[in-house]
Image (cartoon, rainbow, N blue to C red):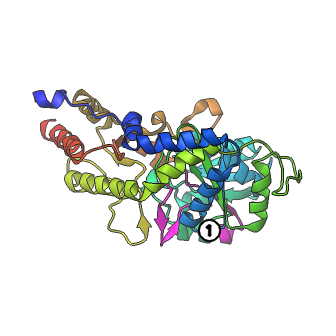
Amino acid sequence: MSDLVTRKIPFFNYAALFKSHEVEFLEAIGDVCRRGAYILQDDLKRFEAAMREFLKVKYAFGVADGTNALILGLRAMGIQPGDEVIVPSHTYVASAAAIHFVGATPVLADCLPDHLVDPASIKALITPRTRAVMPVHLNGRTCTMDPLLALAKQFDLQIIEDAAQALGSKYRGQSAGTFGAVGTISFYPAKILGCFGDGGLVMTNDDAIGQKLTMLRDHGRTSEGEVGCWGTNCRLDNLQAAILLVNFKHLGAAIARRREIAKMYQTELSGIGDLTLPPAMNDDTHFDVFQNYEMESGRRDELRSYLLERGVSTLIQWGGKAVHQLTALGFESSNLPRTELLFQRCLMLPMNVTLTDDDVSYICRCVRDFYAER
Ligand SMILES: *Cc1c(COP(=O)(O)O)cnc(C)c1O
């Protein structure tokens, strides 16, 4: 027991992450600063080209952050006041806020046992005002897209994918973010590919939307420098792009490591107590990158304190509330039973590349001890 209490496993470890490639980071930062290359420079162009190739998408623009990526995407799709956009309630408030900030109404849908949006719930919420659906590829898992694509086709709805948590995640071999009219990524520091501040990406395969996005993120300016429409300033800093290029070199290894950790959790925790683990990896249609490891327990709060007493920090996604439970935002609908149950049960174990095998075994041992002892 005494060796247990001395252990400390933070949920995330920014300092360790920096240290793991410190020399490369400092070189990249120094290089950008010596060139004075700060706005819309070469590093950003190289990073966008790398993203287009990695995601196999025609247009990809670095923008200020993942939330603004959604706002620009919705604008470029023509979403406007009076429109309704259906989005899961189990998401970060940013997904719904982006819809709000283009003047449209976010309509909140329930989720499936895999924690992702339920197409049947979406279908029940469609009205004559519904213009688009925003699937959110949570925790590094791409939504099962076939039924969502069929639904969108049937009701003539556009799709904008919030892939903030899912860079590199795939469904049937195709990258999250590339199925709909628009897809977005976040480079928040704790995301799969993080920068040293805020950053995001907005992508599309549609030429007209691509042209609009070029202008929207840079004061309405076309690639020739003419003002073609009202725009705003929503550019990804060139310095952040340089840092992202460093991290991108390690992305493949980072994804492989996350999947390895998920596999360890899966092996060591399956069949323990009343735990419900996230979908296993032996599935040919989904390639998960495990941004998070979100499991469920009927004694979630007790388990959480037990782990904390043993030095293991866990997280309840988004402060323990789904979007429709954020009463300050004026939501009334509360008939989302699966989402509500999930928020009583969900708990995220540490999941990041700074964890050692030993850390993961220790965490699993603590979880098993909890169920053995109580
Ligand atoms: C992180 C996140 C966002 C917002 O991204 P920012 O870069 O922080 O603006 C949006 N949606 C989801 C699901 C996220 O996890």
Which residue lies at the image location 29% right of the left edge and 56% below the top edge?
260
Of the pair 97 and 140, the residue shown nearer to us: 140
Of the pair 313 and 143, the residue shown nearer to us: 313
Q: Quadrant of residue 271?
A: bottom left
Is residue 160 in the magenta section? yes
Q: Quadrant of residue 1?
A: top left
Quadrant where the C terminus sits is top left
Name the residue that disc number 1 marks. Answer: 151
Q: Secondary structure at mark 1?
A: helix
| Residue 335 visible in the picture | no
Going by the image, does 163 lie left or right of 67?
left
Q: Of the residues shown, which amino acid type is indicated by label 1?
A: Leu
**Extreme left residue here?**
1
| Residue 342 visible in the picture | yes
Could you say where residue 304 lies in the image, as x and y percent from the top left? 30, 34
Going by the image, does 152 lie left or right of 25?
right
Could you say where residue 28 lies in the image, as x and y percent from the top left? 53, 44
Going by the image, does 43 lie left or right of 137?
right
Which residue lies at the image location 20% right of the left edge and 52% below the top edge?
268
Q: Ligand 1 sits in which quadrant?
A: top right
Is residue 73 in the magenta section? no
Q: Which residues are magenta?
A: 152-176
Tally of marks? 1
Q: Looking at the picture, does residue 32 appear above or below residue 59?
A: above
